[in-house]
Amino acid sequence: MAILIDGKQLAADVRNRIKEATSKLPRRPGLAVILVGEDPASQVYVRNKEKDCIHCGFAGQTYRMEDCSEEELLALIGRLNKNENIDGILVQLPLPAHINERRILEAIDPDKDVDAFHPTNVGRMLVGKPVLLPCTPAGVMEMFRAYGIDLAGKNCVVVGRSNIVGKPMGLLMLREDATVTFCHSKTPDLAEHTRQADVLVVAAGRQGLISADMVKEGAVVIDVAMNRDPETGKFTGDVLFDEVEKKASHITPVPGGVGPMTRAILMQNVFAAAKYHMGLDTDEE
Ligand code: NAP
């Protein structure tokens, strides 16, 4: 039976470490969250971020707008970019259709871009050691570290190639000397690749995509996906957990795996951005 990677516990540990370190900073880190529209899932995500900010001792500020124009949103971001008490700016996605998402994300000062979606931060990740990393893949890397999973020389397979999960996930594993394969919807024989994986990270958003026969004995299996089961209405991953856990060495549950880590890394990014803005060393907490 696989070791269960407990994302909930790990995330709580990360938040507690940040809380402790925050108490030693000269001022409280500040996070501005912008929510446009009434999307119910986004409302929940924003409330969770507010809770996490309070726990970590950050000064959180949420801008809730029923509706606004692209120009109004750009103007708000411009003001927050200049505000010295704001270390991180997060625009909750998705935005309403009349607002150009790319234009908005690229207006955020890269040093306050705590989602790390700005092309400057993507480039920094590619070439060096950036301060801000995309939250979901960085959360998975934290899981590897916490469970002593060494990626050097391992065959790592990522299913999914989105800009926010799949691609950065593979790049971060490459930085740890893994040999990385990216699979996607045009990969002709997915199982042929997943069966070679010492470490398999699945982020396709296709419930039940990965069955036990597609997994190598003793593999580490990370399920990033969050699918709503049409029958039960509950969240499920892409991996058939009950059968794959019998074969894997480590496995993440859904929920309670990668999701909580994504939230925790966001707080870590706000903390890192704050230290950077305060002129403090960003390599250690
Ligand atoms: P996305 O933008 O829809 O990307 C999905 C990727 O999976 C695409 O690259 C797609 O290939 C690939 N794919 C789809 N069907 C496939 C198949 N049958 N075989 C192989 N590859 C397939 O999604 P995303 O934003 O990366 O998110 C992926 C999943 O992670 C979703 O379930 C999302 O809810 C979840 N998620 C969770 C967290 C968290 O914190 N836990 C955070 C972000 C996302 P193509 O490129 O060829 O279309």
Image (cartoon, helix red, strand yellow):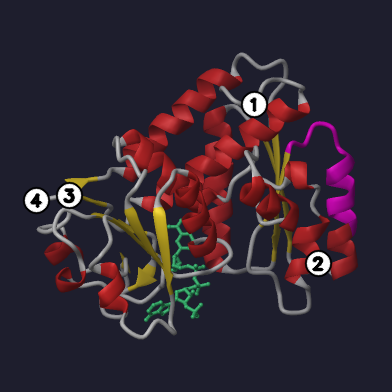
- Number of labels in the image equals 4
**Which of 243 and 12 lies nearest the eye of the viewer?**
243
3D distance between C-alphas at marks 2 and 1: 28 Å
Numbered badge on residue 1: 4
Which marked residue is nearer to the observer: mark 2 or mark 1? 1
Instruction: Give residue 120's position: percent from left, percent from top.
Output: 75, 52
Which marked residue is nearer to the observer: mark 2 or mark 4? 4
3D distance between C-alphas at marks 3 and 1: 34 Å
Q: How would you rate the neighbour count of disc 3 (Cα within 10 Å): few for under 14, some for 14-19, many for 20 or more?
A: some
Q: How would you rate the neighbour count of disc 4 (Cα within 10 Å): few for under 14, some for 14-19, many for 20 or more?
A: few
Instruction: Give residue 80's position: percent from left, percent from top.
Output: 83, 45
Would you say the residues marked 2 and 3 are in contact, meaning their CB atoms lie under 8 Å apart?
no
Which marked residue is nearer to the observer: mark 2 or mark 3? 3
Would you say the residues marked 3 and 4 are in contact, meaning their CB atoms lie under 8 Å apart?
no
* Range of magenta residues: 75-87
Q: Is residue 21 left or right of residue 148?
A: right
Check disc 4 and give the amino acid type. Answer: Met
Q: Residue at x 34, y 34 (%)?
A: 146
Check disc 2 and give the amino acid type. Answer: Arg
Instruction: Give residue 73's position: percent from left, percent from top.
Output: 83, 61
